Structure formats: C-alpha cells, structure tokens
Image (cartoon, rainbow, N blue to C red):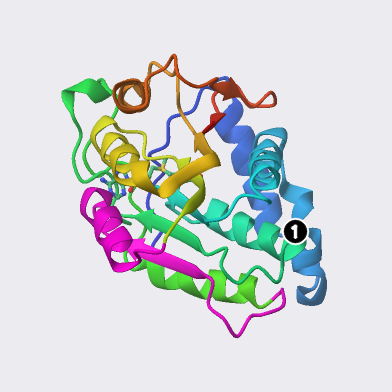
Amino acid sequence: MTTPSSSIITFGPAEEPDRRQQFIELMRACPIPDGELLLNMGLFLTPQTLSRILFMDFLYQKVLEVQGVVMEFGCRWGQNASLLTALRGIYEPFNRLRTVVAFDSFEGFPSVDVQDGARMSQGGYATTAGYETYLDQVLRHQEQEAPLDHLRKYRIVKGDICQTLPAYLAAHPETMIALAYFDLDLYAPTRACLTAIRDRITRGTVLGFDELNDPVTPGETLALKEVLGLDRYAVRRYRYSARTSYLVIE
Ligand SMILES: C[S@@+](CC[C@H](N)C(=O)[O-])C[C@H]1O[C@@H](n2cnc3c(N)ncnc32)[C@H](O)[C@@H]1O
C-alpha cells in the first residue's frame, strides 16, 4: 500500500506540520514491544484526536436505548467505524442488532458541486487503493475483542453513497437508524443521505455532523437546511470541538 500525500485542510500555525512530523517519527520509532503496543496507543493521542474519541462516545451513549443501527457517511480510513465498534463492545456487547455500517467511495469525492465552495475538489480525501480490504481486517479484529464475535456486526459499503445508501436500505428493509454520522463534506451526497434516511429514523435518533457552519464546507449546512430545516431541531455543538455538532430527532 503506498501512502498518498495528505490532502486534508488544517488550521494550525505554520510550525505545526514540522512539529507533527517529529511526533510521527517518534511514533514510528516507538520502542514498546509488540505485546504492549496496542495497550499504549494513548501515548500518541492529542487534544484534537482525543476529542474525536470523546465525541463518538458522547453520541453513542445517547442512543443506547434507541433501536437501530449506526451508520457513518464518509468513513475514509475508518477510525470512527472502529471506535463505534469498540464502544459497542463496551456498552452493549450482546446487542447483535447494533450493526455499524461504514460508507465511502474509498476513491475520494466522486464529484463536487458549485455549492461546495472553492476548496473542495473531485478526488479529495481519497484513500490508498484497496483500503477497504485493510479496513475490513481491522474491523474484524476490533470485533473479536468483544463477545458475539462469530456474528459479523459491521458492514463496509464502497461506492458513491448517492447510490449505495438507497441500495443498502432497499436490500435491508428492516433497517432503522439509531445514529448516523455525516462526514461527507459535500452538498449533494449529504442531501441524498438525509433524504434516503428520512423514513428510517425515529424519535431519539441522533444525527451527528462533522462540518456544519463551516465556510470551508458550506454544502453540509445547505443540505441540512433544505432537507430537515435549521429551525426545527436544536443543533447543538459538541463542546470540546469547534465544528462537530449533532441533533436529536424529537
Ligand atoms: C473528510 S473525509 C471523512 C473522514 C472520516 N469520517 C474521519 O473521521 O476520518 C470525507 C469522506 O467522504 C467521502 N465521500 C464524499 N462524497 C462521497 C460520495 N458521494 N460517496 C461516497 N463517499 C463520499 C470521501 O471519499 C471521504 O473519504
């Protein structure tokens, strides 16, 4: 697997990339023996990455008594899908119906719309070729850390979500959604997903959003405004991160 140069947009100070690179080199040079490596991954968590984990935990705890699956729209490297799988192992290891479904093209943005602003471009946020196969192995291992691991309780759905989500829902007519996390960054697929899930959400369903109110990614807010409206639900931000927010269907 070759590593692509990173295409992510960041807002840190000029010296941040160098500092981060030094930290990465420390991580790669980590002398901890294999038998203790996974136990010590917290060494490399930063406030930014830890707050992401805390947010996933916050969202997951909100849906413990809500029936339905967990979906991530735009999983990219799959960190959230892995975290959500681990959280299931902590909070409800015997909930065999709490499938975690991770969607992505794994080829970056299939297309961008004029509504998405100047900084989004086709192919942005691509993964390495075949990454979904690697992610499948990671999630399989993650699942094996909790009971009922003989039942596969995650799915990875590759392709343009404007097609794959309606197809998934048609193929799984029983699907109710307890938690959906939107991280597509773009107008058209966010709109398509909000539209597709409307008859699969219930009172209590939580919708998480990665980039509402962000001028870099205006499409996500536009899509929410058009499909659900901005005045109908309280859109709350997660207090430990500038951008992430959520609403509860009531
Ligand atoms: C910012 S990244 C997601 C990051 C990931 N959730 C995380 O926390 O690391 C946005 C993802 O949305 C995906 N995406 C955007 N539009 C898509 C579409 N129409 N179909 C499938 N995936 C799409 C991209 O491929 C990309 O991986």
Q: Is residue 153 magenta?
A: yes
Measuring from the top left, give residue 238's x and y in whole percent: 64, 27
Quick check: 204 above or below 230? below
Task: Tell me the quadrant of ligand 1.
Answer: top left
Compared across the picture, whether 208 is left or right of 86 comes to left
Q: Quadrant of the N terminus?
A: bottom left
Does residue 44 sit above or below 119 in this rendering? below
- For the C terminus, the quadrant is top right
User: What range is drawn magenta here?
Assistant: 145-174
The residue positioned 66% from the left and 78% from the top of the image is 144
Q: Position of residue 113 (x, y in %)?
A: 18, 29
Q: Tell me residue 156's x, y (percent).
A: 41, 65
Rendering quarter of residue 19: top right
Going 37% across and 22% down the picture, which residue do you hit? Answer: 221
Residue 1 shows up from this direction: no
The residue at which mark 1 appears reads as 91
Q: Is residue 129 visible?
A: yes
Q: Residues within 10 Å of mark 1 (few under 14, many from 20)?
A: few
124 to 127, vertically: above or below: above
**Residue displayed at 36% across by 60% down:** 128
Q: Nearer the viewer, residue 164 or 131?
A: 164
